[in-house]
Amino acid sequence: MTERPAQRTPNRQLAALIAEAGFSNAGLARRVDQLGLEHGLDLRYDKTSVTRWLRGQQPRGTTPALIAEVFTRRLGRRLTAQDLGLDACAPVYAGLEFAATPEEAVDIVSGLWRKDSGSHAELRKIAFTSAGLVVPSRDWLIGRADEKVARAEPPPRVPPQGRPASRPVGPQELAARRRPTSERVPGHRVTGGDIAALRSVGELFRTLDDAYGGGHARQALVRYLEHECEPMLRGAYGEQTGRRLFAAAAELTRLAGWTSYDIAAHGLAQRYFVQALRLSQAAGDRAYGAYVLVTMSRQAVYLGHGREAVQLARVAQQGAGGSAPPVVQALLHAAEARGHGVLGEVRACTAALVRAERALDAARPGDEVPPWARFFDEAQLADEFGHCHRDLQQFRAAAQHAERSLQLRAPGYARSRLFCRVVLATARLGLGELDQACQLAAEAAAQAAEMRSVRAVEYVRDFERRLEPYRDAGPVRTYRDRVAAYG
């Protein structure tokens, strides 16, 4: 790795932390290399590299954040690159950090938006790391809402002495007043209308994502966050407005992560989720933070990290507490069930599904349900049952629940319906009903071809892998011919 020219003074901060952690130079280098591999990086540092850092050289790129993470894990407290006497790296590489303050959170997430809105294709290649889930979820669980998020207004403009306060407004100044939020000077006063606009935009992008896949308008969402949401977060607002602003920003950031996850940019999605979790803490919204953890749990399930998925769901349950609405409780228990299902833990999965079902049954029409949780209804619960029974190879039950979900699910949730159709196809295949299985899967493949969703394609491919033992059967040949036409 290429290093920057040596500084004049030794790095005493790093030396002190190495001594505290009990690392040898070679041991630190080895741990940095191992953590780099978790992020898809081939670093190849050695004890000589650490000696150079101690002499004052600055490692480039992602390395300062990786070194800080090594010490964070070892010492059990959050450390930044600056704590180690190292230059901070680009915010995108610090995206797995749980910021200490709202201001730091805004710096990290806005850096992520700016990087992602450009042509930085390498961001979408960053690897997912299960180890990166530990510190943020722990910090959220033990953390409290920030005491203060308000930002002061800029000082009022004082007219020059001897001139009247009111004066004619010229065309240039009038144009400046009419500029969109993204072009306003720092200190713009955030209004309720600004926050309503953020939420309306979120609804629009959620609808597009559900119907057409995460790749359809993801870049437009990220650019909106950069050009509209960031200036608001850096504007002026009181406590109540600030909490609402951070809540809206958390929802949009989670959605940016969700759409990244849908196109298989898993490391990038993970960073968005961590930052959405931090923004939810600034908002003082524990229930939404729990929902972000559930989102992270679902990504872990998809990637086969069942144990981490269960842990995230349980942290979400603990953090939300018993005061969360029944629908939210159902959502949290269903997420845990999915993790147990991937692990093949029949009893634990069944128990979590029962808890989810009881919680949803306890919901009443007049209950106040957060808008982001309203999707979790009988159709969604049936979908969760279907996925779990499929993973446990309980195919008859999987088919029953998947059919019920498809009957109840609204057409607008096109991608969810596609997933459920593939679950039903897999269940039919497991029951030996090859004709029906291939027919259902062909319908799903036709839908997937119309979407920008890697997950949708991967669901179909998973079914096709299960077809291999029957590859010479007539229904399978017919299926392959049909699917070939969609390509």
Image (tube, rainbow, N blue to C red):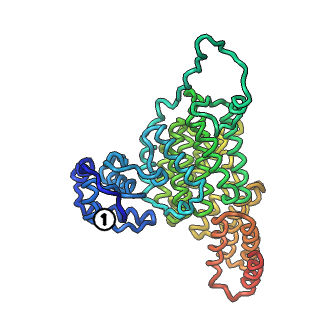
Instruction: Please give the name of the residue rendered at 51% of the width and 31% of the height, measured from the top-left corner.
Output: 149
User: Local crowd at mark 1 within 10 Å, few (<14), some, or many (≥20)?
Assistant: some
Amino acid carrying mark 1 in the image: Arg
Q: Is residue 341 visible?
A: no
Where does residue 348 sit, x and y in percent of width and height?
50, 58
Q: Is residue 2 left or right of residue 478?
A: left
Most extreme residue toward the front is 162
* Residue 261 falls in image quadrant: bottom right
Look at mark 1 in the image and give the residue it sits on: 30
Where does residue 193 sit, x and y in percent of width and height?
69, 32
Where does residue 73 sit, x and y in percent of width and height?
34, 53
Pick whichever, 86 or 249, lies toward us. Answer: 86
Pick whichever, 132 or 142, lies toward us. Answer: 132
Instruction: Please give the name of the residue rendered at 26% of the width and 47% of the height, measured from the top-left corner.
Output: 13
Instruction: Please give the name of the residue rendered at 69% of the width and 55% of the height, measured from the top-left corner.
Output: 217
Q: Quadrant of the C terminus?
A: bottom right
Q: Is residue 347 visible?
A: yes
Pick whichever, 302 or 242, lies toward us. Answer: 242
Where does residue 290 sit, x and y in percent of width and height?
53, 45
Instruction: Please give the name of the residue rendered at 58% of the width and 20% of the height, measured from the top-left corner.
Output: 156
Judging from the image, what secondary structure is the residue with disc 1 in? Answer: helix
Numbered marks: total: 1
Q: Is residue 82 left or right of residue 185?
A: left
Q: Is residue 303 above or below residue 6?
A: below
Most extreme residue toward the bottom is 472
Pick whichever, 83 or 76, lies toward us. Answer: 83
Q: Quadrant of the N terminus?
A: bottom left
